[in-house]
């Protein structure tokens, strides 16, 4: 996509991809879809994730002291107190909430009673995912590493030096592929997840649209996946959406262009609303799709939104 075309597309609230790309944003967002403010008054919202019911959870990684929750009626509340400095959150198939506590350099898990257990310490975690079979993968941005904690609790380095500044992380719907954004480059990398939980065949699968002043750095950040296999990646240019083949569908500017957009997930009724963390605010937008819940098996003959 050339810069002239991209600039003209940015002038619209809804950016539609070039004709050659077969999953335009007009197929994802209804004509009346627009950003709606969900919560504000925080310093730096991050770690957006959803439970099976569609409730949204997030952190205020800079100024907050808790894990916060927004229910299906839009009411926000403190969910887990005394939990500052969290940069990544994810619900597991076991009904537990996993977290990267970047401020304390550890990875933890909160059980159903909100009691905390430490899974790793003296690490530099940024974001994480948890597979249905209990493998936890997390990014270590300062050390160019991706690490795995297996179901038995053993931690190993499964990638080192491939992604310069690994940041956001997401799973394909079938959980056979791990996608990782590079905060210091212009690619989103993918790895095949082997049966033993190791990673293989890395590739720079998606190319981010980058700012003119930093053409090699897109600042890829938080990620999520929908039921159609599309990847949603926050970046310096806004929310970038890619089809399952890695082609760009289009870019949505941040709701507040003066603030960074760093985290995203599907939540709300039917997991059909796309939420983003944008500075101290969280916004949402109605879609015609739905989030791929990593902790739930896709149903046989499942009918998903078109």
Image (cartoon, rainbow, N blue to C red):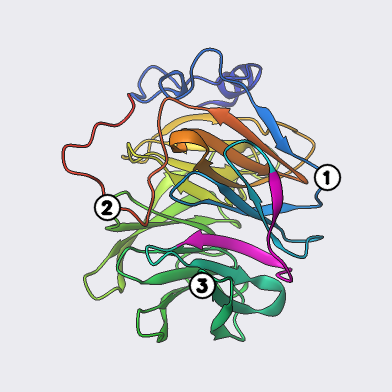
- Residue shown at 70% from the left, 70% from the top: 83
Q: Which residue, given by chain and number where applicable, does mark 2 sit on?
A: 297
Q: Which of marks 1 and 3 is in front?
A: 3
Residue at image point 31% right, 49% down: 173
Who comes first in sequence, dot 1 or dot 2? 1
Among the 4 quarters of the image, the one containing residue 11: top right
Residue at x 40%, y 20% (from the top left corner): 27
Is 16 in the magenta?
no
Q: Which dot marks residue 111?
A: 3
Residue with the mark numbered 1: 41
Residue 194's disc number: none
Viewer-nearest residue: 263 or 270: 270
Label 2 neighbour load within 10 Å: few <14, some 14-19, many 20+:
few
Q: Nearest the camera: 232 or 283? A: 283
- Seen from this angle, which residue lies furthest top? 31
Q: On the rendered structure, is 254 left or right of 118? A: right
253 to 47, vertically: above or below: above
């Amino acid at each position: 996509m050339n810069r002239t075309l991209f600039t003209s597309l940015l002038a619209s609230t809804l950016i539609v991809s070039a004709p050659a790309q077969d999953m335009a944003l007009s197929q994802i967002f209804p004509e009346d879809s627009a950003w709606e403010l969900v919560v504000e008054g925080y310093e730096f919202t991050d770690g957006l994730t959803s439970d099976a019911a569609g409730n949204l959870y997030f952190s205020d990684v800079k100024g907050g002291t808790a894990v916060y929750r927004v229910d299906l009626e839009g009411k926000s509340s403190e969910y887990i107190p005394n939990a500052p400095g969290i940069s990544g959150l994810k619900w597991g198939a076991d009904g537990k909430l996993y977290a990267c506590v970047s401020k304390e350099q550890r990875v933890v898990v909160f059980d159903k009673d909100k009691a905390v257990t430490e899974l790793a310490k003296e690490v530099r975690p940024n974001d994480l995912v948890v597979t249905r079979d209990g493998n936890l993968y997390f990014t270590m941005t300062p050390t160019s590493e991706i690490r795995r904690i297996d179901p038995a609790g053993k931690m190993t380095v499964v990638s080192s030096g491939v992604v310069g500044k690994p940041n956001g992380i997401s799973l394909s719907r079938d959980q056979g592929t791990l996608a990782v954004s590079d905060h210091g480059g212009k690619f989103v990398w993918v790895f095949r997840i082997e049966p033993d939980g190791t990673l293989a065949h890395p590739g720079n699968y998606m190319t981010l649209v980058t700012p003119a002043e930093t053409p090699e750095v897109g600042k890829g950040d938080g990620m999520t996946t929908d039921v159609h296999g599309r990847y949603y990646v926050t970046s310096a240019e806004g929310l970038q959406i890619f089809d399952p083949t890695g082609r760009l569908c289009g870019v949505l500017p941040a709701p507040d262009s003066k603030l960074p957009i760093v985290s995203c997930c599907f939540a709300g009724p039917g997991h059909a609303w796309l939420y983003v963390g944008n500075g101290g605010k969280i916004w949402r937008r109605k879609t015609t799709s739905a989030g791929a819940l990593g902790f739930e098996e896709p149903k046989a003959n499942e009918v998903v939104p078109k």
